[in-house]
C-alpha cells in the first residue's frame, strides 16, 4: 500500500523532477518507509511513497523497472493472486514465444510488470486485488493506468495544456502550478444529497477520478500531443454467473467456500496483521474465519467510547473469548475523541461526512503496531444488511397499484421528525414512481426537496446508474439490483474513499474480503429469495452457523457512532456556527433555508445533525485548501 504520482507532458518548460518530488512528498503519510522520484525520459516522471508490506527488501522499492528496462511501474495496493500468477509467468508455454519472466524480487509489484510484459493492457483481467497503478513504456512513449474493479484504490488526474498528472490523493494535484483550484459547483447537488461526488468528477473543476474497473492509456502522437483512450474492462452484469437453478443448501456451501478463500488470500503479509472487531456480523465472520487459518491468535481491535448507549464493547469482548484472539479494547473518552476531530479534518484529503470515524479507528489500530487490518466493508451491501433492501423491495412490488397524488399528499402531512425512518419515508413518498430505479437514489438522499439549501434544487445528479442493471429486476434479481447500486455509489464513493484516505493517513492498509470478485459475482447471481432479509443477512449467517453466535446475529445493528448531535450543539457549536455562516454567503446557497434548518436543529426542533456535518466539513475543506468559489 503506497502513494503514487507522475507527470507525462509534451511541455519543456516544467521542471518535471521538482514538480513530482513535491507531489510525492505530499504522500509521505501513505508510504513512510521509502520515497523516490525517477525522471524516466524528457516526457515522463514517476514518484512513489512506499508502505512495506510484501517483500520488505529494498529491491522491491519503486519506481520499479522490468528486467529489460523498458517498462516502469508505480503501484498502490495489493495483488492477492500474485503468487499463482508468478508461477504461471515463470512457466514455459508450449508452442509459444513467451519466455519465463526472470523475477528479481518476491513482490506483487513485479508480478504486475511481468503480466504487462506478457499480456499488455489485458493484464488487468488477470489481477485479483485492490490496485491503482501506472506503467510507462519508455520505447513507445505511452502511459497505461488502471484501477481495480470495486474502486478500493483511487487515482486522481488532471489534464491541461498537453500535460497529464496523476496521484493517489487530490491534494498534490490541487497544488500544482497549472491547476485551477476552482470549486466544481456542478457537483454540489450530489455532495449535498449524498455527501460525495461520483467519478469521474470531483469537487475541483480541473481534477477527475478514474472510474473503478477502468484503464486509461495516454500516448504521444506524431503531432507531439497527448492522445487518450479510456476503457472499462469489467462490470457486474457481464460477469454474473447464472445461478438460478442452484439449491439454497448448495448456495450456502459456495458462499462459505468463497468467503473462506477470500479471507485466506488476504492474510498474506510480511508485517503485523490484525482485524477490526466491532461486535457485529461482518467483522465477526472475518475474525472467525481468520482463526481457522492462522496458527497464532488473531490480533483484534475494538474501539469504543465512554458514551454507554453507543458502546458495543460487551459484544466484541464476548467474541474475543470465543475466537481466542489477542484482543485490544481501546477506550476513547469523549473529550479525547473530541480533541481528535480537528486533527482528522486536517488529514482529510477529500470532504466527507463519515471519514472522522474511520480516522479515529485507524489511528488507534496503527498505534498498536499493526500495519494491515481486515475489515467487514461490503458485507451489508452484498448480503442485504441495510433496511433499504426490505423497504425498496416492498414498495417496488406496490408500483402497479400506486396512486402518486395520494402518496405525495400523505408526504405533506409528515412533520419534521427526530426519526431518520419517518424522515426518509417522507422523501420516498415524494417519488414520481415506486419502481426501484426511481426509489433507490431518493433513499440515499440527505435532504427532502423542500429543505435542500441550494439555489438550484433541480440540478443534475451524477449518481452512478447503469440502465443495463434494470435487466436484473426483470430477471427477479431486485436484491442484486439494490446491491449493485449500493456498491457503485455509497460504498465506493463514501465508504471506500474514506477507508482509503483515513487509514492511509495513518499508514494502515485495510483489506476487504467481502469485496472479493468471485464472491461478489456469485452472490449477485443468486435469486432474491435466498438473500431477502427475513433475518439479518440470512444467507451469510446460515452459511457460517458454526462461526457466528446467535446473540451476535440477532442483536441490534449499531456500528461505531460518535455523538455529533450533542457536540454540534455544545463543544463544537462555535466552530459549526462559523462554518454555516461562511457557507451561507456563497451564491449557490439558499441562505434562508440553510439558516432556518440550522436554527431548528440548534433549538432541538429536529435532531438531523447529518444534514449539516458534511456541509461543515466541505466549508472547512474549501478554506483549508484555498479553493476558489465562483
Image (tube, helix red, strand yellow):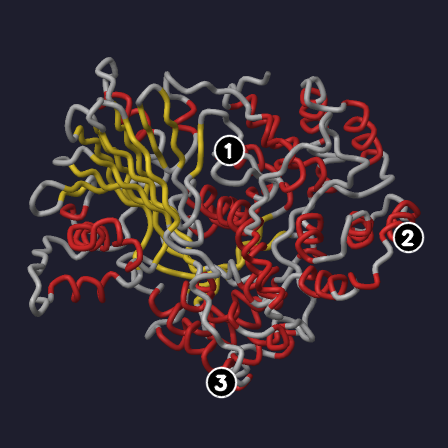
Q: CA distance from mark 1 to mark 2?
A: 38 Å
**Residue beneath disc 1:** 202
Q: CA distance from mark 2 to mark 3?
A: 45 Å
> Image point 67% across, 63% down: which residue?
389
Horizontal relation, residue 364 to residue 214: left or right: right
Looking at the image, tell me whether mark 1 or mark 2 is earlier in sequence order. 1
> Image point 56% across, 42% down: which residue?
356
Q: Is residue 204 visible?
A: yes
> Image point 52% across, 20% down: which residue?
182
Horizontal relation, residue 171 to residue 282: left or right: left
Viewer-side residue, 131 vs 620: 131
- The numbered dot on residue 250 is 3
Residue 264 percent coordinates (x, y):
35, 70
- The numbered dot on residue 406 is 2
Quadrant containing the C terminus is: top right
The part of the image, by quadrant, that contains residue 49 is top left
Residue mark closest to the camera, 2 vs 3: 2
Q: Is residue 303 above or below residue 172?
A: below
Viewer-side residue, 318 vs 259: 259
Residue mark closest to the camera, 1 vs 2: 2
Element on which disc 1 rests: loop
Q: What is the crowding at mark 3: few (fewer than 14 residues within 10 Å), some, or many (at least 20)?
A: few
Q: CA distance from mark 1 to mark 3?
A: 43 Å
Element on which disc 2 rests: helix
Horizontal relation, residue 611 to residue 314: left or right: right
Element on which disc 3 rests: helix
Q: Is residue 552 visible?
A: no
Q: Are marks 2 and 3 in contact (CB under 8 Å)?
A: no
Amino acid at each position: 500500500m503506497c502513494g503514487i504520482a507522475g507527470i507525462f507532458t509534451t511541455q519543456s518548460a516544467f521542471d518535471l523532477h521538482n514538480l513530482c518530488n513535491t507531489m510525492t512528498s505530499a504522500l509521505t503519510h501513505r508510504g513512510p518507509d521509502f520515497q523516490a522520484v525517477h525522471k524516466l525520459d524528457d516526457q515522463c516522471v514517476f514518484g512513489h511513497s512506499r508502505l512495506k508490506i510484501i517483500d520488505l527488501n529494498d529491491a522491491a522499492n519503486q519506481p520499479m523497472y522490468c528486467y529489460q528496462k523498458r517498462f516502469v511501474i508505480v503501484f498502490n495496493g495489493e495483488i492477492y493472486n500474485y503468487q499463482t500468477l508468478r508461477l504461471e509467468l515463470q512457466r514455459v508455454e508450449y508452442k509459444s514465444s513467451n519466455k519465463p519472466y526472470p523475477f528479481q524480487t518476491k513482490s506483487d509489484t513485479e508480478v504486475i510488470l511481468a503480466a504487462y510484459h506478457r499480456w499488455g493492457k489485458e493484464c488487468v483481467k488477470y489481477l485479483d486485488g485492490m490496485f491503482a497503478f501506472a506503467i510507462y513504456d519508455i520505447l513507445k512513449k505511452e502511459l497505461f493506468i488502471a484501477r481495480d474493479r470495486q474502486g478500493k484504490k483511487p487515482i486522481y488526474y488532471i489534464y491541461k495544456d498537453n500535460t497529464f498528472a496523476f496521484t493517489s490523493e487530490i491534494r498534490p494535484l490541487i497544488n500544482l502550478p497549472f491547476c485551477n483550484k476552482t470549486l466544481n459547483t456542478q457537483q454540489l447537488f450530489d455532495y449535498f444529497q449524498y455527501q460525495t461526488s461520483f467519478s469521474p468528477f470531483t469537487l475541483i473543476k480541473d481534477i477527475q477520478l478514474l472510474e473503478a474497473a477502468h484503464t486509461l492509456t495516454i500516448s504521444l502522437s506524431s503531432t507531439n500531443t497527448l492522445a487518450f483512450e479510456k476503457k472499462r474492462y469489467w462490470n457486474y452484469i457481464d460477469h454474473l454467473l447464472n445461478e438460478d437453478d442452484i439449491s439454497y443448501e448448495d448456495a450456502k456451501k459456495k458462499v462459505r467456500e468463497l468467503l473462506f478463500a477470500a479471507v485466506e488470500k488476504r492474510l498474506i503479509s510480511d508485517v503485523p496483521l490484525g482485524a477490526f472487531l466491532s461486535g457485529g456480523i461482518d467483522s465477526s465472520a472475518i475474525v472467525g474465519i481468520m482463526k481457522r487459518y492462522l496458527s497464532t491468535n488473531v490480533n483484534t481491535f475494538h474501539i469504543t467510547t465512554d458514551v454507554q448507549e453507543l458502546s458495543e464493547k460487551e459484544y466484541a469482548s464476548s467474541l474475543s473469548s470465543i475466537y481466542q484472539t489477542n484482543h485490544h479494547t481501546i477506550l476513547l473518552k469523549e473529550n479525547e475523541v473530541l480533541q481528535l476531530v480537528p486533527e482528522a479534518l486536517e488529514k482529510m484529503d477529500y470532504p466527507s461526512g463519515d471519514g472522522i470515524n474511520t480516522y479515529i479507528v485507524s489511528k488507534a489500530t496503527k498505534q498498536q503496531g499493526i500495519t494491515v487490518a481486515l475489515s467487514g466493508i461490503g458485507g451489508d451491501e452484498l448480503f442485504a444488511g441495510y433496511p433499504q433492501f426490505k423497504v425498496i423491495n416492498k414498495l417496488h412490488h406496490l408500483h402497479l397499484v400506486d396512486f402518486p397524488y395520494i402518496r405525495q399528499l400523505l408526504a405533506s402531512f409528515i412533520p419534521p421528525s427526530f426519526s431518520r425512518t419517518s424522515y426518509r419515508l417522507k422523501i420516498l413518498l415524494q417519488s414520481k414512481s415506486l419502481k426501484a430505479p426511481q426509489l433507490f437514489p431518493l433513499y440515499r438522499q440527505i435532504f427532502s426537496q423542500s429543505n435542500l439549501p441550494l439555489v438550484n434544487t433541480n440540478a443534475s445528479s451524477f449518481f452512478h446508474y447503469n440502465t443495463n442493471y434494470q435487466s436484473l429486476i426483470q430477471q427477479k434479481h431486485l436484491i442484486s439490483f439494490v446491491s449493485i447500486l449500493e456498491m457503485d455509489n455509497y460504498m465506493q464513493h463514501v465508504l471506500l474513499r474514506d477507508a482509503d484516505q483515513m487509514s492511509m493517513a495513518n499508514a494502515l492498509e485495510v483489506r476487504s474480503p467481502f469485496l472479493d470478485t468471485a464472491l461478489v459475482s456469485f452472490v449477485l447471481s443468486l435469486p432474491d429469495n435466498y438473500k431477502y432479509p427475513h433475518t439479518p443477512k440470512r444467507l451469510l449467517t446460515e452459511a457460517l452457523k458454526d462461526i457466528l453466535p446467535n446473540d451476535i446475529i440477532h442483536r441490534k445493528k449499531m456500528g461505531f457512532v460518535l455523538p455529533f448531535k450533542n457536540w454540534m450543539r455544545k463543544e463544537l457549536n462555535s466552530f459549526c456556527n462559523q462554518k454555516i455562516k461562511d457557507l451561507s454567503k456563497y451564491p449557490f446557497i439558499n441562505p434562508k433555508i440553510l439558516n432556518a434548518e440550522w436554527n431548528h436543529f440548534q433549538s432541538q426542533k429536529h435532531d438531523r445533525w447529518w444534514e449539516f456535518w458534511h456541509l461543515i466539513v466541505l466549508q472547512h475543506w474549501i478554506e483549508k485548501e484555498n479553493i476558489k468559489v465562483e
